[in-house]
Amino acid sequence: MNNLSLTGRIIIAIPMLVFGIFHFAFGAGMAGMVPSWLPGGVLWVYLTGAALIAGAVALFINKQARLAALLLAAFIAIVILTVHLPGMLGGNQVSMSMLLKDLGLVGGLLLVAHTTK
């Protein structure tokens, strides 16, 4: 793997790790972002936080990194569709910013998956 791919993999793992930590540190406040049709509230926040941390670790240590990047991309795409898109369509400009940020992360994760064995 060349240095550019390694650097990209490490850089995209950093926000995944931080977001995962935030899920545990601010879980109660984030529970309101869980779609109302999905039972469990804060449980989903903690579960997805653990998934974000596990994915970040896999990217950092390059073990199952391709799978981790694909799963993280799928998870963030689901968040875009179930959390940010409804907010954006409701006129929330913060949701639009979050959607665009997450869309960029999905693109980066797909590139990492493509360049990682």
Image: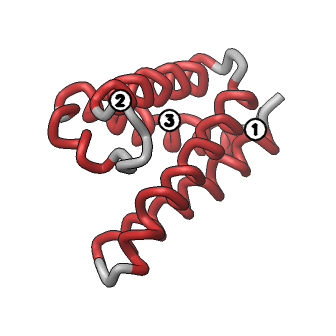
Q: Residue at x 65, y 29 (%)?
A: 68
Measure how far apart labels 1 and 3 are at the Cα level: 17 Å
Q: Nearer the viewer, residue 63 or 96?
A: 96
Residue where numbered disc 3 is placed: 13
Residue 30 left/right relative to 38: left
- Quarter of the view holding residue 45: top left
Q: Residue at x 42, y 58 (%)?
A: 83
Above or below, 10 against 78 in this view is above
Residue 117 left/right relative to 101: right
The local secondary structure at tag 3 comes to helix
Residue 78 x, y percent position in the rendering: 57, 50
Residue where numbered disc 1 is placed: 2
Q: Give the amino acid type for the residue marked by disc 1 in the picture.
A: Asn
Q: Give the amino acid type for the residue marked by disc 3 in the picture.
A: Ala
Q: Give the amino acid type for the residue marked by disc 2 in the picture.
A: Gly
Label 1 packing within 10 angstroms: few (<14), some (14-19), many (20+):
few
- Quarter of the view holding residue 94: bottom left
The local secondary structure at tag 2 comes to loop
Residue 57 x, y percent position in the rendering: 51, 20
Residue 2 left/right relative to 14: right
Residue 61 left/right relative to 46: right
Quarter containing the C terminus: top right
Residue where numbered disc 2 is placed: 40
